[in-house]
Structures are given as structure tokens and as C-alpha cells.
Image: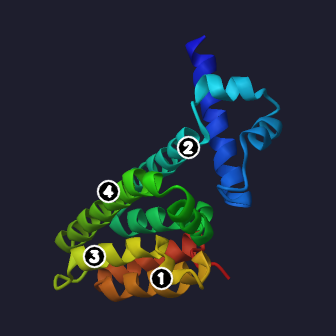
């Protein structure tokens, strides 16, 4: 029985994440979610008290998935790209803006906290890259990690995530690299076809 409940919760989180990305947070009702999942609203409420609780679960699941991708990476360059690419695939500025506007408490208590964790993870990866000779030793890891985490900010709202990733993230990473790091980055770009045209 416990496994069934866990599977239903997971399915609700996955489908809600998809719907929030497509229609926006405000644009998705519990009725929409129930209809999309082909389950009753009662089943949803048996698993989550409110839409806000589902939203929090979606944010937590998204960041957990990013951390898992980072742990599976072969090297620090790959790990940073895995974190950033995950955002390119699922996140968008409109959703962040909507979260700030309509769910400020969730934004402050959950998203900002998780973004701060991500900033610290990237900072640690940069420091590790410096120790391993992949990144230049004169880098300020705190500033760079902070900048990488700002792409979820409205400062970049006029640009697509693809533009951010292609133009900004890869360019900054290349500038951070030693010759050894540049080779690793070029190999990753070739193998994984990082550039999104």
C-alpha cells in the first residue's frame, strides 16, 4: 500500500511540474491536474493538502534531480554543465517570475534556499576544479557561482534559457578553464552536443 501512495505522489509531482511549465503556476488548477492525471481531486488531496504543497514538492524534486545529475558527472566541468543544462531543460523565467509574484512565501522559503544550496555546490565544484588544475587558480569561485545562479533571476527575463546557456554559460566556463580544462570542455561539447542551435 505504501508503495502505491509513493507512486501516486511521484506521478502527481511529475505531471504537475509539466503542467506548471506549460501553463504557468496560476494557470493550473487542481481540476486541471486531476483531469490531466485521470484521477479524482480527492486522490490529489489525499496526497497533498494544497496546490502550494504540490508546488513545493515540484521544486524539491527538481533540485534533487539536479543534484543527482551533478553526482553522476565524470568531472567538475561536466558537473557544472549538468546543473546548468537541467535548468535549460525544465525551468523558465516566466515560471520564476510567476512564483515570485503569486507565491512569494514559497519563493522565499523554498526556491531561494535551494538556489543558495546550488550556488554553494557550484562554488565547491569550482574550488575542486582549481585544485585539479582544470580551472585557473586566480578565480573567485564565490562570484562565479553567484553569477551562474542569477540566470533564474528576472535580470535575464528578455533572453531564452538557450541563449543564456549557449552564449553566457559556455563562454564563462571556457574563460575559467586552463588548457587541460578547455580540452575537457571541448570533449564534452563534442560528445554531448552541448550547443543548442
Rounded to the nearest whole Å, what is the CA distance between mark 1 and mark 4?
A: 20 Å
User: Residue 52 bears which disc, if any?
Assistant: 2
Rounded to the nearest whole Å, what is the CA distance between mark 2 and mark 1?
A: 25 Å
Residues under numbered marks 2 and 3 in contact, where contact means CB atoms less than 8 Å apart: no
Compare residues 189 and 2 and report the one nearer the observer. Answer: 2
Q: Residue 39: x, y in percent?
A: 79, 28
Compare residues 62 and 72 and report the one nearer the observer. Answer: 62
Q: Which of marks 3 and 1 is nearer the N terminus?
A: 3
Q: Name the residue under label 1.
A: 155
Depicted 52 relative to depicted 169: above or below: above
Q: Mark 3 points at which residue?
A: 134
Q: Residue 51: x, y in percent?
A: 61, 41
Is disc 3 surrounded by few (<14), some (14 to 19) or many (20+) residues within 10 Å? many
Is disc 1 surrounded by few (<14), some (14 to 19) or many (20+) residues within 10 Å? few
Q: Splitting the image into 4 quarters, where does residue 38 fall?
A: top right
Q: Splitting the image into 4 quarters, where does residue 23 fall?
A: bottom right
Rounded to the nearest whole Å, what is the CA distance between mark 3 and mark 1?
A: 30 Å
Residues under numbered marks 3 and 1 in contact, where contact means CB atoms less than 8 Å apart: no
SS of the residue at dot 2?
Answer: helix
Amino acid at each position: 500500500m505504501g508503495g502505491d501512495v509513493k507512486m501516486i505522489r511521484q506521478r502527481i509531482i511529475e505531471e504537475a511540474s509539466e503542467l506548471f511549465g506549460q501553463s504557468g503556476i496560476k494557470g493550473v488548477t487542481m481540476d486541471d491536474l486531476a483531469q490531466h492525471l485521470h484521477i479524482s481531486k480527492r486522490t490529489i488531496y489525499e496526497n497533498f493538502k494544497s496546490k502550494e504543497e504540490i508546488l513545493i514538492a515540484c521544486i524539491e524534486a527538481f533540485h534533487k534531480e539536479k543534484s543527482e545529475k551533478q553526482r553522476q558527472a565524470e568531472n567538475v566541468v561536466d558537473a557544472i554543465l549538468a546543473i546548468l543544462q537541467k535548468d535549460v531543460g525544465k525551468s523558465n523565467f516566466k515560471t520564476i517570475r510567476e512564483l515570485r509574484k503569486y507565491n512569494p512565501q514559497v519563493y522565499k522559503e523554498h526556491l531561494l534556499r535551494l538556489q543558495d544550496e546550488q550556488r554553494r555546490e557550484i562554488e565547491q565544484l569550482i574550488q575542486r576544479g582549481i585544485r585539479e588544475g582544470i580551472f585557473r587558480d586566480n578565480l573567485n569561485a564565490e562570484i562565479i557561482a553567484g553569477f551562474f545562479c542569477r540566470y533564474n533571476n528576472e535580470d535575464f527575463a528578455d533572453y531564452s534559457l538557450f541563449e543564456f546557456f549557449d552564449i553566457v554559460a559556455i563562454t564563462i566556463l571556457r574563460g575559467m578553464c586552463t588548457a587541460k580544462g578547455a580540452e575537457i570542455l571541448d570533449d564534452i561539447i563534442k560528445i554531448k552536443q552541448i550547443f543548442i542551435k
